[in-house]
Amino acid sequence: MDTLLAPLATPLPPDLEPHRFWIWLQMVAWRLYVRAVKGRGIPFMTVIDRQGTVYLKWIGHPPHEIPQAPEDPLAFTPSKAFRIAMGDLESAHPGESQDHLQRAAGESPRGIRFTKSGPLPLPDI
């Protein structure tokens, strides 16, 4: 038997039982549409509302499921930059640790010594 004219696969609720023929007719129309658009043997899903209207939900393979949320959505996982800033990891840049030590001693990487003095003079106008 051809699946185009197959009866409804699922039982209907009691309030939709009087409209069984019209629901089946809508299903035949949707099957014809899916065959015309995608070809024979393509899976599809329909939904029937409370008034007996049949809607096409998807054609082809079912949509992917929603990925599961992590157990604790407020859990903090520190990034690599944060861990480097906190000193847990070494930096990937060569020579950065020496620059950090020179700046802590009061020298710039170019050998200029910083001194703490009073406020800067006002600029010339």
Image (cartoon, rainbow, N blue to C red):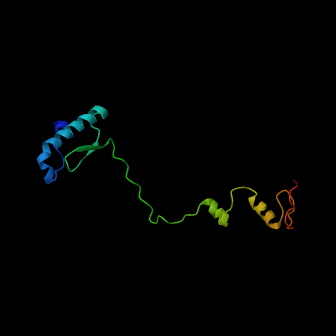
Apparent side of residue 103 relative to residue 41 in the rendered image (left or right): right
Residue 24: image quadrant is top left
Give the vertical position of 46 relative to 98 (above or below).
above
| Residue 63 visible, this orientation | yes
* Residue 54 shown left or right of residue 83 in the figure: left
Q: Residue 62: where, in percent of width, then height? A: 33, 46
Q: Determine which quarter of the picture holds residue 79.
A: bottom right
Q: Is residue 79 left or right of residue 124?
A: left
Which is more toward the observer, 119 or 71? Answer: 119
Q: Answer with the quarter of the image where residue 30 lies.
A: top left
Residue 28 in the image, given as x and y percentages of width and height: 20, 38
**Residue at x 34% of width, y 43% of height:** 61
Pick out the residue farthest to the left. 18
Vertical placement of 5 versus 64: above or below? above
Q: Is residue 40 visible?
A: no
Q: Is residue 78 above or below residue 2?
A: below
**x, y (%) of residue 87?**
67, 66
Count the labels in the image.
0
Instruction: Residue at 63%, 60% (x, y): give it.
Output: 81
User: In the image, is 85 to the left or to the right of 109?
Assistant: left
Q: Nearer the viewer, residue 70 or 122?
A: 122
- Identified at 23% across, 44% down, the residue is 54
Q: Quadrant of the N terminus?
A: top left
Query: What percent of the width, then of the height, locates residue 16?
Result: 15, 50
Residue extending furthest top? 36
